[in-house]
Image (spheres, rainbow, N blue to C red):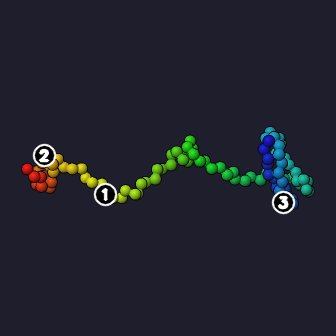
Amino acid sequence: MPTYDFRCTACANEFEVTRPMRATQDESCPTCGAPAVKVFAPVTVAFKGSGFHNTDYRAKPVDTSSDAPKPEPACPAASGAAGCASCPAAGTATD
């Protein structure tokens, strides 16, 4: 059975009541007998591990460790093969 927190409207006494969920919500203060209201508190829930939207669909962190420029692909003219005439590597090929 769930436990509910209540606060008295007259004397501000806070108390807990354990009862079935289908029971009536009317409660009176055990100290003074005045009506009491239910106290709502935030529930602490931590979604850890796989299977939750928070962990599975979060943006992946960007890898900043490889900031060095990537080498450009080799030009076919640089290896002696026929390439484009405007390529600067075409003039450096040795025959």
- Which of marks 1 and 3 precedes in the sequence? 3
Q: Residue at x 21, y 50 (%)?
A: 74
Q: Nearer the viewer, residue 16 or 22?
A: 16
Circle 1 sits on which residue? 69
Q: Nearer the viewer, residue 7 or 72?
A: 72
Q: Would you say residue 86 is visible in this rendering? A: no
Q: Residue at x 52, y 45 (%)?
A: 56
Spot occupied by residue 33 in the image (x, y as percentages of width and height): 91, 54
Alpha carbon of mark 1 to alpha carbon of mark 2: how far?
26 Å
Residues under numbered marks 3 and 1 in contact, where contact means CB atoms less than 8 Å apart: no
Is 41 situated left or right of 86 in this image? right
Q: Residue at x 69, y 53 (%)?
A: 42
Circle 3 sits on which residue? 12
Alpha carbon of mark 3 to alpha carbon of mark 1: how far?
67 Å
How packed is label 2: few (under 14 Cα within 10 Å), some, or many (20 or more)? few
- Which of marks 2 and 1 precedes in the sequence? 1
Identify the residue at the far left of this view: 95
Identify the residue at the far top of this view: 22
Circle 2 sits on which residue? 81
- Which of marks 3 and 2 precedes in the sequence? 3
Q: Give the amino acid type for the residue marked by disc 3 in the picture.
A: Ala
Spot occupied by residue 50 in the image (x, y as percentages of width and height): 55, 43
How packed is label 1: few (under 14 Cα within 10 Å), some, or many (20 or more)? few
